[in-house]
Structures are given as C-alpha cells and as structure tokens.
Image (tube, helix red, strand yellow):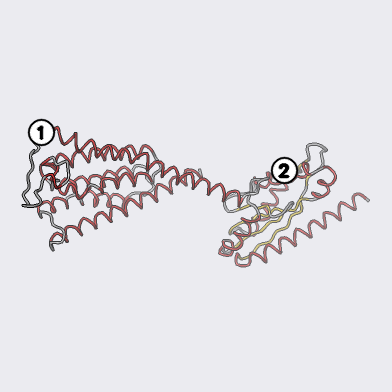
Amino acid sequence: MQLNEVRSRQEENANRFTLKCMVLLLFGLFLCWFLNIVNIFVVDMKLMNRALLGSLFIIIALMIAHFVDLKSRWLKYVLIFAMMGAITVDGIAMTYHMTLLSVLPLFLSIQYSSKKTVIYTYVLSVISVAIIVIIGYFYGLCDANMLLLTTGQMREYVDMTTGAVSFPVVNERPWITLPLYYIFPRSLLLFLLVPVMNKISNGISNTAVELAHVQKEAEQDSMTGIYNRNKYLQMVKSFYENIPMVGVIFWDINDLKKMNDVYGHTNGDYMIISVANRLKELSADNRKLYRIGGDEFIMIVENPEKEALERIINEWNSKGPMYHSDDNQTITAAIGYAYGEGKRIKEIVDKADHDMYMNKKNMKNVSEKVQV
C-alpha cells in the first residue's frame, strides 16, 4: 500500500512538472509570435500564425488536467501526446527552429520511471519527425540543405571573391532523399538518446533507493525493526510539539539485566524481540512505536481520547503473559502513561516515565512479598 502511494505521488509530481513545461512552451510560442511582429524574430507571418495552431493542443491538455486527478495513470499519455502535437504543428511551420524541442517530450518521459512511457514517447517522436520533415519541406520554413542537398562547407558553394552562389544539384527526388537523409538520421539520434536518458533515470532511482536505505537504517532499530531513539528525538523536536494532544505510554522490560547476566545476551535479545513484536500489534498510523533504550519502549499516540491510552494498555494485558521458550520464564514489563498537549511533549514523556517507574517499583514489592 505504501509503495502504491509513493508511485502515485511520483506520477502526480511528474504530471505537474509536465504541465509547467507545457505552459512554458505556450508562453515561448506567443513570445516568438510577438517578436516576429516587431521584426526581431524573422519568419513569414503566415507561417508564424500557422505555428500558433499548435497552442490548441496545449490549451486542451491544460483544460483536461484541470478537471481530472493529476494522479490518474492515463494522464501522462495525454499530456505527452498534446506536447508532441504542439511541437509537430510548430515544426511543420518553422522546421529547423523546432528541432531541439523535439527532444523535450523524451526528457519528460524519463521522470515517470516507466519504460512503456519512454517507448510510447519515442514512437510519437519518430512520427513527429517524419511529419515535420515531409510536410515542412513543402509548406514550412524549410532548411536550405533540404531543398538543395548541400553537404559541404559554405566555401564549396560560394565564390569568396565575387560572392556568387552556385548549387549544382536541386532535390529532384524528395520522397527518397528526405526519409534517407533527414527522417532516419534524426530518428536515430533520438534513439541514441533513449539509453542515455534511461541510464540517467536509473542512476537517479538507485541514488534515491540508497538514500532511502540509509535513512531507514538511521531511523530503524536493527534488532526489532521499529523506530529507534534517533527517530524518537527527531519527532519530539520537530513533530509532536505541533500536535494538539498526545498520549505517551512507556514499557520497561523487567529483569532484562538479570536475564543477560544469568542466561546470556541471546536470551535477553529474545525478551526484547518478544516485547517488540507484541507492541507492533498495538501500533497504528497515529500510534508510533520507538525503542529508546535497551529495555525501554515508548508509544506516542497522536490526538487520542484520554481513555484510548487505557484501552491500549488493557489490550496489551488481555493478550496474556509471554514466556521464554527455553526455561518457560514469564516475560513482563512495567507500564506507565500520561496525556496532554503536544507542545508539552517532554513533560508528558517525563510523567509517563515516572508513572512507569512507580509501576515497576510496585511490581517489585509484590514479587518480594510473594517470595516471602
């Protein structure tokens, strides 16, 4: 469940970033249109007006995104298709000006960490390149070398002394030369980018996993698998003080030192793990459990009713005694609890600790009377 939530958040963040890029692309398109009006960006105005039609893809996609959940799994395909549609329409009108933008959807597809999304985007990119090259050749702002098939340096075609230009060959077979010399090379370059981008993506993912593992080790008690003292101190300092009401329950294992001294640390560890496993059954999203010492456990409950702490303790007691598997010795723990405002969390912890200490003292007195 937690993994699905992480993936859902990743999908939402990726869609949100894609939308931001689309808005930026829309802004850039209208900026070019304005610059063309003031003769800073020189393109035939008819072509520039045609290029504006590409903005319709982006506007429609923005409207769809406004009315749906950004966590929707299908939304990324709509957004990438819309961006590719806008780039294709703009590319037909302005060909070589849009060459670099053709790569943008591929870069955006990486953030979804899905090979299927990357393949989908690559296929759209190849189709887009083909449409831009062929239709742009006849109706767009065409590259000179697409029409004249120039392949060398400028001095091969220009007489530097007279300034005369000479192109020996004109593209007489565009349906052969365009796919061979332009569609295939550009598609190949896009293909070569895919493993590079996947490598980057995998590197980012591996780093994220390693960081998560390091953070988990820093926060988790290696023996019991629950939060450790470091996590407890961090939460007390930065989290629980902002919670309106908190409840604190202390558990302290009885006779752990005696068990370690007489029977060995392996048996003592068994006691610790047994108590931790029992406590895990009582934990929940608003009941976080910490091991803060060798034999001390603490549960902090967020916004509980005062009676909720007693119910948790009663549930602990109702599960019956635990026994050591080797000598059938009973495993017990002293318990203390306190309740109050989150901003006084440290005072509440001290009260629960004191209550636990008094409980332990009473249990010891009862045990001594029984032995007498």
Real-space Cα separation, disc 1 to disc 2, in angstroms:
81 Å
Q: Amino acid at mark 1?
A: Arg
- Secondary structure at badge 1 equals loop
Decide: few, some or many residues near mark 1? Use Cα within 10 Å; few <14, some 14-19, many ≥20: few
Side (left or right) of 271 relative to 282: right
Q: Residue at x 37, y 39 (%)?
A: 195
Q: Amino acid at mark 2?
A: Ser
| Outermost residue, top side | 176
| Residue 82 in sight in this render | no
Q: Residue at x 61, y 53 (%)?
A: 288
Side (left or right) of 181 relative to 109: left
Judge by depth and name the residue closer to the eye, 329 or 200: 200
Decide: few, some or many residues near mark 2? Use Cα within 10 Å; few <14, some 14-19, many ≥20: some
Query: Which quadrant of the view contains residue 265?
Result: top right
Residue picked out by circle 2: 274
Residue 72: % across, % down:
37, 45
- Secondary structure at badge 2 equals helix
Residue picked out by circle 1: 173
Q: Residue at x 35, y 44 (%)?
A: 109
| Outermost residue, right side | 372
* Picture disc at residue 336: none
Residue 196: % across, % down:
37, 41
| Residue 94 in sight in this render | yes
**Mark 1–mark 2 CB contact (< 8 Å):** no
Side (left or right) of 152 relative to 14: left
Judge by depth and name the residue closer to the eye, 250 or 213: 213
Which marked residue is nearer to the observer: mark 1 or mark 2?
1
Judge by depth and name the residue closer to the eye, 335 or 42: 42
Side (left or right) of 309 relative to 41: right
